[in-house]
Amino acid sequence: VQLQASGGGSVQAGGSLRLSCTASGRTFSGYVMGWFRQAPGKEREFVAAITWSGGSTHHADSVKGRFTISRDSAKNTLYLQMSSLEPEDTAVYYCAAGFNQGPINWGQIRFPREYGYWGQGTQVTVSS
C-alpha cells in the first residue's frame, strides 16, 4: 500500500488549500482513511476521517466547519479541503489508512495506532 500526499503550501490566514492523497496497492473497501497533522514539538493530532465504502465522516472539533474530508473512490484519492486557515493550523499533514472491521468507533479512530499505512506528509504553513 502506498499513500502519496500533496497540495500543501504557504497561505495567509483566512486562505484555503486542498490536500490530496493518492492511494494505491489494494482496494480500500472496509478501510477508514484519515488526516492527521503534527506541528513542531507537538504530538500527531487527529484532523478528520472517512469510511472508504460508505463515506461517513468525522472531524476534530478544532477544524469542524472549516475543513472537510472527502474521497473519490474512482480515483482512489482522499481529499482535505481546508478553509479559513489559521496560523494554528500550521503543521505537516499526513494521510493514513486503517482497516476497520465492524461498526465504526469514532472515538477509537482518532488515534494514530488505528492506522497501518501512512503517507509521507505535506507541509502547510499559515502566516498571520
Image (cartoon, rainbow, N blue to C red):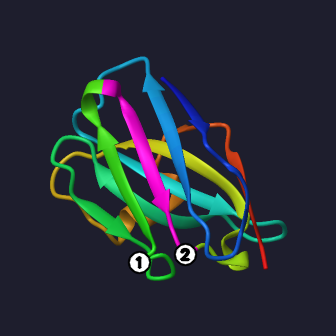
Main secondary structure along the magenta-highlighted residues: strand
Which quadrant does the C terminus fall into?
bottom right
Tell me residue 102's x, y (percent). Answer: 16, 51
Circle 1 Cα neighbour tier, 10 Å, few/some/many (<14 / 14–19 / ≥20): few
Disc 2 marks a residue whose amino acid type is Ser
Residue at coordinates 44% horizontally, 28% vertically from top-left? 23
Disc 1 marks a residue whose amino acid type is Lys
Q: How many marks?
A: 2
112 versus 19 height, above or below: below
Task: Place residue 86 in its image quadrant.
Answer: bottom right
Q: Which residues are magenta?
A: 75-84
Residue at coordinates 35% horizontally, 72% vertically from top-left? 107
Position of 24 with respect to 126 (left or right) is left
State which tag comes first along the sequence, 2 or 1.
1
Q: Which mark is residue 64?
A: 1
Is any atom of residue 86 visible in this view?
Answer: yes
Q: Is residue 111 rendered magenta in the image?
A: no
Q: Secondary structure at mark 1?
A: loop
Circle 2 Cα neighbour tier, 10 Å, few/some/many (<14 / 14–19 / ≥20): some
Q: Is residue 79 rendered magenta in the image?
A: yes
Tell me residue 30's x, y (percent). Answer: 23, 38
Q: Are marks 2 and 1 in contact (CB under 8 Å)?
A: no
Task: Place residue 45 in its image quadrant.
Answer: bottom right
Q: Which residue is mark 2?
A: 84
Task: Place residue 48 in its image quadrant.
Answer: bottom left
Q: Secondary structure at mark 2?
A: loop
